[in-house]
Amino acid sequence: MSRMSRTLALRLSAGFLFLVASWIAYTQNQKAPPELKLNQVKSDLYEIEGDGGNVAVYITDEGVILVDDKFDQDHEQIVAKVKSVTSQPIKYILSTHHHADHSGGNAKFLPTSTIISTLNAHNNIMEHKQSNAPPGVQAAPVTFTEQTAVFLGGKEVIAKAVGRGHTNGDAVVYFPALRVLHTGDLMAGTTPLIDYPGGGSLKEWPATLDAAMKQFDFDTVIPGHGPVTTKDGLMTYRNNVDKEVKRVAGLVHQKKSEEEIGKIMMAEYGWMPNSLNMQWSLPGFKTEFK
């Protein structure tokens, strides 16, 4: 082998080894999605928790109806969890709102499932209202403005836009035969996250929950985040939101600065610095409660 050939071979080998090392480093730095957990709520109804919003799984003899689909990275785990309890395909997905931790999986489900959301949720995705959304989130191709229903395998699921709260496109999803309500992020965590850029409203939030509780007869609640609870648990959450409405209104009327209100929210409601509450909710208080 000539000196030139040996030099070329060494350079090619070094280049190959560099690419291999780079690929190994890249793959090692890619964090695997958190493990999801499947919980049975009632007969033929399950909930998948972890890494984003709670997904409801409703099994029928003709297919599966999901509520929400988490992030794009959770697609394979969601499909695997569903397959662990039924051989039926996922036919429909009802989206509670536009945020990527609830609708981020739309793109991978669209080829095989019909995805439905409120028109406002659809528009919020198309208009990129979520500033921190990952690229590629797809809007639902089927929309409604007030109420819709899916009938599959002799079972009914109702999606209803009951008012503003977390966003302007929130829907609750009701399972009449099981008396279960999925609230999306109209109930999530211990304190409400008001997405003012996405049309949310703290002031209207209690009335929105009142409308849901008045219209639907249920005893079990699947929240957007957190453990499955009861109607009493939802009422407690609603009353705490109402207290927050009064607290924030009082602070604004006292002419407190945005910085002062932020410190109070961190102290009294557990808001964290640089949290979405501070980014999305705090700047809108003075406008809504002026």
Image: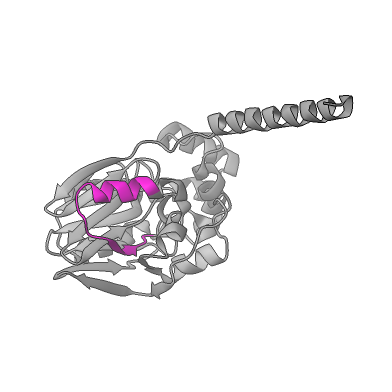
Viewer-proximal residue, 18 or 104?
18
2 lies left or right of 123: right
Q: Is residue 90 magenta?
A: yes
Q: Residue at x 34, y 55 (%)?
A: 184
Most extreme residue toward the front is 1
Q: Is residue 46 left or right of residue 54?
A: left
Visible in this render: residue 276? yes
* Residue located at (37% from left, 61% from top): 95
For the point 30% across and 41% down, which residue is it? 226
Q: Nearer the viewer, residue 283 or 49?
A: 49
Residue at 57 percent across and 65 percent down: it is 127
Reply above or below: 21 against 215.
above
Here the colouring is one colour
Q: Is residue 105 above or below residue 29?
A: below
Answer whether residue 239 is visible to the viewer in this image.
no
Answer whether residue 147 is magenta in the image.
no
Quarter-of-image position of residue 170: bottom left
How far across and down, in percent of the image, does residue 47 sit? 25, 48
State which quarter of the image contains the N terminus: top right
Left or right of residue 159, residue 286 in this image: right
In this picture, which residue range is highlighted in magenta? Answer: 76-96
Residue 20 vs residue 222, the one in the foreground:
20
